[in-house]
Amino acid sequence: MATLPDPVELTRDLIRCPSVTPAEGGALALLEDLLTAHGFVCRRIDVEGIANLYARWGTAAPNFCFAGHTDVVPIGERAAWTADPFGAEIRDGEVIGRGATDMKSGVAAFAAAACKFVTETPPSGSISLLITGDEEGDAVHGTAAVLDWMEGEGEKVDLCLVGEPTSRETLGDMIKIGRRGSLTAYLTATGVQGHSAYPHRARNPLPPLVKLLDRLASHTLDEGNEHFDASTLALTTIDVGNPANNVIPSEARATLNIRFNDGHTGASLIDWLTQEADAASVDGVAIGLTTKLSGESFLTPPGQLSGIVAEAVAKVTGVTPELSTTGGTSDARFIKNHCPVVEFGLVGKTMHQVDERAPVAEIAALSRVYEEVLRRVFAS
């Protein structure tokens, strides 16, 4: 019988794999060996240089899936770290390293819980793990590609828990039951270059663009609703690239990002932005618009799945979690098209930071929460 993995040591082993997007770094190979030894059937779904893993124990329904990613963001300035970013040093009760919080600890916690559960209390249904190497990148050839492959194979998931770091201050204080959508808009105002002493001979793109940006930033998209905060629009950059103070530029560009709730769709927001850009195209200045929709908003209404996870969290941690839709996007935005999905994991305060770290005790507790979730899923 294979030795059951310790979630803390597994976290450390994963951190030692330098899996900066899009590199696999040995992380998925490590998990594949571990899961195979515990009876999981593993499939590698590698797409366009991105490594992904789908592992399943059992063949019967229901199929409960844990989802997550082993890819991490770059370390940034190496000299700023006080520990090896891929050394997994334990200091003052915390594991330090890139991915310690986001989210190699979560993957280790649910992999350890799944191995323990199928070994000690084999369920009548199935347990699966969907682990991608493309969450921190473009997210095109990761979870979405695996889900497409699963659909083609007739592989169905009934419930899914994503192990992203969702807790805010204390382990257990927040579960994500949805996420806002994300839309980025790129505006380009095109005029006619000229001498600043003769502005009437030019067509300055800046005034129309600035007026448009002020109108967009001042607009109230909505007031929020029962499950979502108000949608937000943030201007992120304005660029002219003009080194001369006596030249009116021919072009000016700006970028903005909208995080929107379920009162909008990507299409409705693009229509609004298009109308605003068209209306601002005056005085010989045309304002063009291109957009990138990273994901629509979604909500898994409070119910069976969120109830099971909340009860498991409360039992292990003693904390009653808030059901929230705050924060950025995650791969749950793809999974929600296939089955109910919620997210729960560690406190995310140090993710993507220098000396990213996670408390040893909380990694162990997180794995116990995931194990309790499995008990409740297969007892119901």
Image: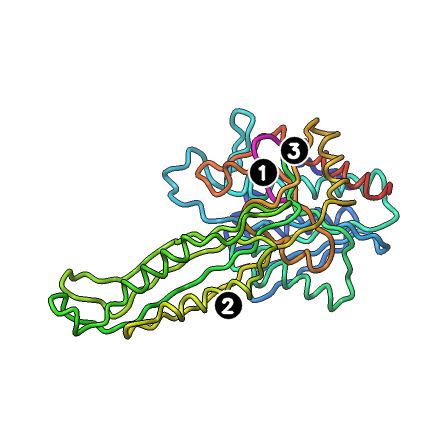
97 or 16, which is in the foreground? 97
Q: How far is the residue under mark 1 from the one under mark 3?
A: 22 Å
User: Outermost residue toward the top?
Assistant: 92
Number of the front mark, 2 or 3: 2
**Disc with the residue nearer the chain's start (1 vs 2):** 1
Give the SS element for disc 3: loop
In the picture of the structure, the residue carrying the numbered disc 1 is 12
List x then y, in percent, for residue 82.
Answer: 42, 33
**Discs 2, 3 touching: Cβ within 8 Å:** no
**Discs 1, 3 touching: Cβ within 8 Å:** no
Q: Residue at x 86, y 55 (%)?
A: 60
Does the magenta stretch mainly form a helix, a strand or a loop?
Answer: loop
Left or right of 77, for residue 115:
right
Q: Quadrant of the N terminus?
A: top right
In the picture of the structure, the residue carrying the numbered disc 3 is 172
List x then y, in percent, for residue 189.
Answer: 32, 68
In the picture of the structure, the residue carrying the numbered disc 2 is 271
Res. 58 mark: none
362 or 98, which is in the foreground? 362
Q: How far is the residue under mark 1 from the one under mark 2?
A: 47 Å
Q: Quadrant of residue 167?
A: top right
Q: Quadrant of the C terminus?
A: top right
